[in-house]
């Protein structure tokens, strides 16, 4: 059994599988929504265990936290629901393989909590939640705008310190301003 942090693609696949199961077989999560849901899972897991849920770092992009590996893995879907899963690739022979979903009680709890409470929201509301004033993304984005940081990475320490703010915001205050979804620009 592996321990956290996990391959972000394996965690994303698990989240997508469970969401599809909850929606009775319908694919409903777009890449933009997946990015936000995965970040919320990461924040919940970090709060519960003190460890990051996924390897690598989320970055502050215009539409909120983005994990570059997940962006690359699912960008082909653009604003459409994701209908396939990310695969791993053997670096020596180039063969693709299925990723093993992590088995971790706390991770399962974080995924289920996020799905039950947030997966039904439109992507625009998820973006709004990830943009909560003084939350992790907002804190780093302000530093980027001021030029006081040299990276877009959202450190786990910032997510741990400021992550709760994302879940305190009233869901009714989030707006449906995104008529059509757009993927964050590639960096």
Image: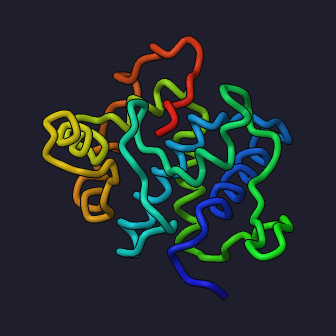
The foreground one among 171 and 125 is 125
Give the position of the N terminus as an image quadrant.
bottom right
Name the residue located 22 percent from the left edge and 40 percent from the top edge: 144
Name the residue located 60 percent from the left edge and 56 percent from the top edge: 112
Name the residue located 82 percent from the left edge and 36 percent from the top edge: 26
Residue 179 placement (x, y as % from top left): 55, 11
Residue 122 placement (x, y as % from top left): 56, 26
State the image quarter where residue 182 is shown.
top right
Q: Is residue 142 left or right of residue 97?
A: left
Q: Is residue 62 left or right of residue 91?
A: left
Residue 117 placement (x, y as % from top left): 52, 43
Numbered-mark total: 0
Residue 8 placement (x, y as % from top left): 59, 62
The foreground one among 62 and 169 is 62
The vertical placement of 76 against 7, above or below, is: above
The vertical placement of 132 against 88, above or below, is: above
Residue extending furthest toward the front: 92
Q: Is residue 115 left or right of residue 51?
A: right
The foreground one among 23 and 42 is 42
Name the residue located 39 percent from the left edge and 29 percent from the top edge: 128
Q: Is residue 143 left or right of residue 71?
A: left
């Amino acid at each position: 059994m592996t321990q956290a942090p996990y391959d972000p693609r394996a965690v994303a696949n698990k989240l997508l599988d469970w969401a599809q199961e909850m929606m009775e077989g319908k694919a409903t999560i777009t890449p933009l929504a997946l990015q936000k849901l995965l970040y919320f899972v990461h924040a919940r897991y970090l709060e519960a265990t003190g460890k990051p849920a996924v390897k690598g770092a989320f970055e502050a992009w215009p539409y909120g936290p983005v994990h570059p590996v997940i962006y690359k893995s699912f960008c082909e879907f653009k604003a459409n629901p994701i209908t396939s899963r990310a695969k791993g690739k053997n670096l020596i022979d180039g063969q693709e393989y299925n990723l093993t979903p992590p088995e971790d009680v706390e991770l399962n709890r974080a995924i289920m909590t996020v799905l039950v409470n947030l997966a039904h929201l439109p992507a625009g509301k998820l973006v709004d939640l990830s943009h909560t004033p003084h939350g992790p993304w907002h804190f780093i984005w302000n530093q980027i705008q001021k030029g006081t940081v040299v990276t877009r990475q959202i450190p786990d320490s910032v997510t741990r310190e400021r992550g709760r703010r994302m879940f305190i915001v009233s869901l009714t205050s989030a707006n449906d301003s995104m008529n059509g979804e757009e993927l964050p620009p590639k960096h």
